[in-house]
Image: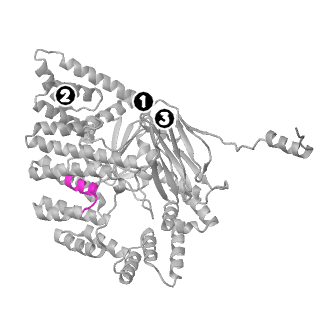
Amino acid sequence: MKHLSAGLLLAVLLVFSCKKEVEKVNTYTMGDFELSTDVVTHNKPITITYNGEDQDMEGFYYMLNGYKSYPKDLNFENGKATISIPDSITAIALNLKVDGKYLDNDKKGYLFPVLDKDGATIIGSNSSMEAYKSGNGQNYGIEGDADVLAKTLEAEITANPELKELWGTRYLSNVMRSDSKKGKALANTMLTEFAAKKDLTEEDYTQISTIYRNLRDAKGIDSISKIAIAKFPNGELKQQALMNDFYGAKTLDEKETIFNELETNFGMSPSLSYAANSIAAQKFKEGDEAGFKLYASKITNPNDKAGLYNSVAWPAAEEGKNMEMASQLSKASLDLLMEAKQDVSNKPAYYTENQYKKSVDDAYNMFADTYALLQYKLGNVKEAITYQAKAIGDGKSSDVNERYIEFLVADKQYKLAAEEANLFLSEGHGTSKIKEFYKTAYTSINPDATDFDSIISKIDKANHERELAELKKSMLDEEAPQFVLKNLDGENVSLGDLKGKTVILDFWATWCGPCKASFPGMQQVVEKYKDDESVVLLFVDTFEDGKNREESVAKFIKDNNYDFHVLIDGKVKDSNDYEVAKKYGITGIPTKIIIGPTGKINFRAVGFSGSNDKLKQEMDLMIDLLKS
């Protein structure tokens, strides 16, 4: 056996004794989720593991770049999901849903800047994350701050001027929202830069128009639009001008003339599909079947066409008019949605694939409700029951549930009607009419029974206790921003003067459909507490403009016989924001803020479920809880 030389022996020993230095990786915990790393790097796979017990948990994430965000599903298999972030992305935001609620991380969210392969943070990641917080993040319980966004963006653009092109006029709008004086100065600088250019492109003109819009300079907008349209007669600004003319047109003939010009010059665009939808709906209303079919045929997106068909079929179902044609259109809307679900190419950019499919399912349930009602009124009760069962979905729509029980009782399916009615009522998704139908079904099965009232009493008591417990869990303890607003009589109303009372602020607008749909229920609440000095309801009209705003709001209230104490939310000077809505972080209406006797915000209710019975019950529960 040959002996190794000393040098060679040393080399061998080094090979076997030296260990490769392993890069240390830290995991990151998010509730019952664990991220395989606390550092997100381009093109390096990341595993997210769920260690909880909720079988229905779900999640998705946004890939961020500047003000743009791209949603992607987290597809978990055996409790694990793996993602990889491409080079074009500056940051990500994870949204994880457990027990029906998104984890908000104390309203900070789970946001991560992205690093390049050398470990350097991608330029612009901070402003991307702040833009998300002030935008999409607010849908998931995350707090954003316009001032922080403006300052972050200003600092990053100053350090990295190349970001200016990425943000474009969005940079201006963010600065303007935070500081109008600084925003005006920036706008003038941008206009000077454009003026220095020798040849302006169509995109340049569009940006200049946007700058004037931020400055609220109508003359500037009009002037630059005329120049751009003359230079680019088939350009984007010309198309926008024609669409504005379409929205302002008063007659159907005017709309058709403008539509034809748009279609001839620009072809069928998504915005023109909306215009075709509008004309087709009006044609249907006027009984012009040929005209309806002509404009409906121009709509190529199956979701849009299904929406048109349902929008004309539902009023026909309610009014009992033209129901045969409405029935055909309603069935066609369901077939179109089945087609749409199979083809995700129609998915809007703001949906993940899973979200898109769910949205199609939700639309199918809603449109099935229309078709079922039409079949019921046409005498096809069994067909109505089949489709109403599909319309129920998760069973949380009380009105849909009510129609299902009504159809079952009409078909004398008393046993099933009684079982389903009991289920809906026990889960808190019933109505007073469901109780009536339940009684009919129950007494038909048990003609000698005397215990029906006690059954309902037990259900009501259990619902009350459960909902009260849920309310207590959701109770807030936030400072209520002070304000003084004028009512429709020109009198000042101060929140500070109402301390010691339970105050309900209902943020609404005359253009808001769900707001108006909720008002019959709110009128019942007003009537119930009109003599109770410890409860004050204030209806804050917001997100609404116009020279005759107060008069139109007053007319709406009077015409509908509502006994509401209305306040007019003032617009913030040189801004699109509204004074009190901004203070309370209102991003959508209807929103109800319930302030307890201590002056703290105790509840925040966003949207309208569609059931005025349920709305009144919720208001009663909140008021009772704050009185106790």
Query: What residue sits 43% from the left and 58% below the top?
Result: 577
Q: Is residue 396 above or below residue 446?
A: below
Q: Which residue position is annotated with label 1?
A: 472
Q: Quadrant of residue 101?
A: top left
Q: Quadrant of the N terminus?
A: top right
Residue 197 position within the rendered picture, expressed as x and y whole percent measured from the top left: 52, 82
Taking the spot 55% from the left edge, 67% from the top edge, the residue there is 182
Q: CA distance from mark 2 to mark 1?
A: 27 Å
Element at label 1:
helix
Circle 1 or circle 3, nearest the eye:
3
Mark 1 nearby-residue class (10 Å; few <14, some 14–19, many ≥20): some
**Residue 435 marker:** 2
Q: Which residue is mark 3?
A: 78
Give the magenta-colored segment's residue range.
299-309
The answer for how far apart the CA atoms under marks 2 and 3 are is 43 Å
Q: Earlier in the sequence, mark 1 or mark 3?
A: 3
